[in-house]
């Protein structure tokens, strides 16, 4: 494949070629470890030169074979991802790591193992509650995960290597934060579609390579020739594993600028850095318990407190409307949505609440819903 | 209707018949407690905190039970529709939709809707947990939009089967104890009362004795003919799940044991001609249409065991633990990992392991699973269970599809056709065995 020197183009190419690129890395001797969700501590894999690969699905193809092995009452993102595995598209994986984030994650590993055995699998029990005891528990869990990875590779993770890995991932987080700041301009200096492609590219390559890509992207943005772009209604998209840039692209085709997200594959996965203290494992555990704002974690407090961060996003990015783009059978988001919608409405934000399958095979209806909502935003 | 004609042919136990009055008294007591100012808590089953509530005189209202009750009595529909009108997906847990609909209507109208057993009294607190599914804490978080009462949720941690138990036991038990202690601290602050550890310990002992008798009663169901109907199985768990620690609950299970023993000793079964012994091996029951189990019975099919609400596995209280919270945390770990070692060595899955143990013990001829459209936790993996079991035991599996509450998802006629066909294949399998 050819790799463009320009960051945004390269990101798009990397995303489109993510599967062959991963196969190429595997053929060169890299161990590619698939993982689900933003609760997997990828830093531990990076510290051992393993390549973490975020498992995605396909919105452009129907589930073909997975329904023979997986119930249809499961979220279609998980079904699609598993379908890719069954169809052999993830055969480059050396292993798979699944954190206990939601009910679907709780079950999928054994099903995957039965039908697509892998050399290495690991399940991390992640607390659903926040607090010091939860952090301490996860620290113990992560120590065992670390041991397991060390056995896989045949060497120990030194404290220095772990700290370096955390720093490298924090660097990616900081660079992404910087890129997101360019969305605050009106019109934004980088589109939601472009950012979605950058994020998507980063989910399948080593973090060091991703950081280089991000620097190129920042350079691209800074040196772009000024275009006569018109202002568009500014929207924030909220949801789960919305990993296909085509969804963001569709919203933008309908006349909006997606200027911020609260998605598992977007800001939720990088907004907060690991606060690296003396004990690196403790720091990692605290990050993965406290910092990720997925509804799978119970946070005490009234709606005004729990959703304040989202209100801050909306205000900081000068958002005019919010799209709750949720997948059917995702209980965490489904139970959150009506209260969240009411809260955002009270704060003056129009909200479009959609519950969809993980597919873009039937774009027409979705396009109509987006268009109608965006028209109301003026 | 299966409910009226088929049911007459079944020989139900008196113990199971006694459950409905117990449930009525449970709701009556909760309402009375509310009236006299005693603290009432919305609770989730299996959260491992039951005995703490009993020891602190907090009256639990089991919100999932109320969903099942409304479904069984055919009164859930207005609540489901209300929750859906409020924006809750028709794919989220049927219990949660029922409970949310009920409480949203109460919030709107200022009084509880007219429902069975007077409805759920207004709670003073919501006590969720992470055991089993995410809905058990997300539901109460959602309720926070409609009622201004404190919410407290705890983690209940189930170790992965792949782990070395000796390696994880200490920190798993420690975390569970910390979670329970956090709850106690919250309850003491909310109620203004201190937990009496001696009282808690005594309630734990009584609860464990009740569990022991239930477990022993269940072992009697190995007998041929089976002494208890499927519907009875789905009734007799109620005192344990909703009234544990009470003397009446202990008495209930002692009486159940005696009744089943008398039946077994006398060779009394639940149907005249027992032909097939089935295991309810996945999902939760279709509470809206429990008569379907009588239809099984009318065709000579009995359910000696079920995995929706099985009795807790045996646990012997160690002599050397004086702290009841530590004991409860240890008990959770021991119970959750009861068959981990066997699963770890064999099939690799605790649920499949349980099925594989019950099949020979209870002479099972086939498996029945209920795919619940609104429940990921109990429905995801059913095909996997079937496939994994086939490696060790050649058994036919029937998959029924509907919901725990929402009857709109159910077709009795279709289900009966499925059952007829399934039992024909079981018959063939048995004759070829």
Image (tube, coloured by chain):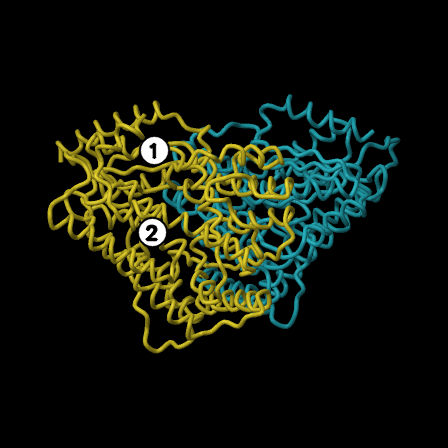
Chain colours: A cyan, B yellow
> Which disc number belongs to residue B102?
none
Give the camera-side residue of B234 and B7.
B7
Residue B331 shows up from this direction: yes
Drawn side of residue B393 relative to residue A122, left or right: left
Identify the chain of the residue marked 1, using the numbered disc in the image.
B
Q: Residue furthest top?
A: A364
Q: Judging from the image, what secondary structure is the residue with disc 1 in?
A: strand
Q: Residue at x 44, y 37 (%)?
A: B71
Q: Judging from the image, what secondary structure is the residue with disc 2 in?
A: loop
The image position of residue A239, as x and y in percent, is 64, 41
Check disc 1: other Cα within 10 Å, few if <14, some if 14-19, many if 20+. some
The earlier-in-sequence mark between 1 and 2 is 2
Per the model, the C-alpha gap separating discs 1 and 2 is 23 Å
Q: Residue at x 60, y 47 (%)?
A: B143
The image position of residue A293, as x and y in percent, is 64, 52
> Which residue is disc 2 drawn over?
B348
Check disc 2: other Cα within 10 Å, few if <14, some if 14-19, many if 20+. some
The image position of residue A331, as x and y in percent, is 54, 42
Give the camera-side residue of B376 and A303.
A303
> Which residue is disc 1 drawn over?
B399
Identify the chain of the residue marked 2, using the numbered disc in the image.
B
């Amino acid at each position: 494949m050819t790799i463009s020197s320009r960051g945004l183009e390269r990101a798009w190419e990397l995303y489109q070629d993510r599967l062959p690129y991963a196969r190429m890395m595997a053929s060169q001797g890299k161990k590619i470890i698939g993982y689900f969700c933003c609760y997997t501590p990828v830093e531990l894999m990076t510290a051992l030169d393993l390549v973490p690969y975020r498992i995605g699905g396909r919105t452009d193809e129907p589930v073909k074979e997975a329904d023979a092995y997986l119930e249809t009452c499961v979220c279609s993102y998980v079904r699609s991802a598993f379908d890719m595995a069954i169809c052999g598209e993830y055969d480059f994986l050396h292993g798979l790591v699944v954190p206990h984030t939601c009910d679907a994650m709780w079950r999928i590993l054994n099903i995957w193992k039965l039908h697509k055995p892998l050399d290495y699998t690991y399940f991390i029990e992640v607390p659903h509650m926040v607090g010091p005891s939860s952090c301490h528990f996860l620290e113990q869990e992560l120590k065992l995960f670390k041991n397991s990875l060390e056995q896989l590779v045949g060497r120990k993770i030194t404290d220095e290597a772990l700290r370096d890995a955390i720093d490298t991932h924090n660097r990616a987080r900081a660079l992404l934060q910087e890129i997101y700041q360019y969305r605050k301009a009106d019109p934004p200096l980088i589109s939601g579609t472009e950012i979605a492609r950058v994020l998507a590219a980063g989910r399948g390559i080593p973090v060091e390579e991703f950081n280089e890509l991000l620097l190129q992207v920042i350079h691209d943005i800074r040196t772009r020739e000024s275009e006569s772009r018109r202002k568009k209604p500014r929207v924030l998209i909220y949801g789960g594993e919305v990993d296909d840039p085509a969804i963001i692209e569709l919203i933008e085709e309908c006349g909006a600028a997606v200027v911020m997200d609260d998605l598992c594959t977007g800001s939720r996965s990088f907004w907060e850095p690991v606060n690296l203290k003396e004990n690196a494992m403790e720091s990692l555990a605290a990050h993965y318990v406290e910092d990720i704002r997925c509804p799978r974690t119970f946070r005490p407090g009234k709606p005004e407190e729990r959703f304040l961060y989202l209100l801050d996003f909306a205000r900081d990015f000068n958002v005019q409307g919010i799209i709750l783009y949720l997948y059917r059978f995702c209980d965490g988001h489904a139970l959150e949505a009506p209260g969240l919608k009411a809260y955002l409405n009270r704060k003056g934000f129009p909200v479009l609440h959609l519950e969809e399958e993980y597919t873009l095979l039937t774009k027409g209806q979705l396009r109509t819903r987006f268009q109608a909502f965006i028209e109301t935003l003026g | 209707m299966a409910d009226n004609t088929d049911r007459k042919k079944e020989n139900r136990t008196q113990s199971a018949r006694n459950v409905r009055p117990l449930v009525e008294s449970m709701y009556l007591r909760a309402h009375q407690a509310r009236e006299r100012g005693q603290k009432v808590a919305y609770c989730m089953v299996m959260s491992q905190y039951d005995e703490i509530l009993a020891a602190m005189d907090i009256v639990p209202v089991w919100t999932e039970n109320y969903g099942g009750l409304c479904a069984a009595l055919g009164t859930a529909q207005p609540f489901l529709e209300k929750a859906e009108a409020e924006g809750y997906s028709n794919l989220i847990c049927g219990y949660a939709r029922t409970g949310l609909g009920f409480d949203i209507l109460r919030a709107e109208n200022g009084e509880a809707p007219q429902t069975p057993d007077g409805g759920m009294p207004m709670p003073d607190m919501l006590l969720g947990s992470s055991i089993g599914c995410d809905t058990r804490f997300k539901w109460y978080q959602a309720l926070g939009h409609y009622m201004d009462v404190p919410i407290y949720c705890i983690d209940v941690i189930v170790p992965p089967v792949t782990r070395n138990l000796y390696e994880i036991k200490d920190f798993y038990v420690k975390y569970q104890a910390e979670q329970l202690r956090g709850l106690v601290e919250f309850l003491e602050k909310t109620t203004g009362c201190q937990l009496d550890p001696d009282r808690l310990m005594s309630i734990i002992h009584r609860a464990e004795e009740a569990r022991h008798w239930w477990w022993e009663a269940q072992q009697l169901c190995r007998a041929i003919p089976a002494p208890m109907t499927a519907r009875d199985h789905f009734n007799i768990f109620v005192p344990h799940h909703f009234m544990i620690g009470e003397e009446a609950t202990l008495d209930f299970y002692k009486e159940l044991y005696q009744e089943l023993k008398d039946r077994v000793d006398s060779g009394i079964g639940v149907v005249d001609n027992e032909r097939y012994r089935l295991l309810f091996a996945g999902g939760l029951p279709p509470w809206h249409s429990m008569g379907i189990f009588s239809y099984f019975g009318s065709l000579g099919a009995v359910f000696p065991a079920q995995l929706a609400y099985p009795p807790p596995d045996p646990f012997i209280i160690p002599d050397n633990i004086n702290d009841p919270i530590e004991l409860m945390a240890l008990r959770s770990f021991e119970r959750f990992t009861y068959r981990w070692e066997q699963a770890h060595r064999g099939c690799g899955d605790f649920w499949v392991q349980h099925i594989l143990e019950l099949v020979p013990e209870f002479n099972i001829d086939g498996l029945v699973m209920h795919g619940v459209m609104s429940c990921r936790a109990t429905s995801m993996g059913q095909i996997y269970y079937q496939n994994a079991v086939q490696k060790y035991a050649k058994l036919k599996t029937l998959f029924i599809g509907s919901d725990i509450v929402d009857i709109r998802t159910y077709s009795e006629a279709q289900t009966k056709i499925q059952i007829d066909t399934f039992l024909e294949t079981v018959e063939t399998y048995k004759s070829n065995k």
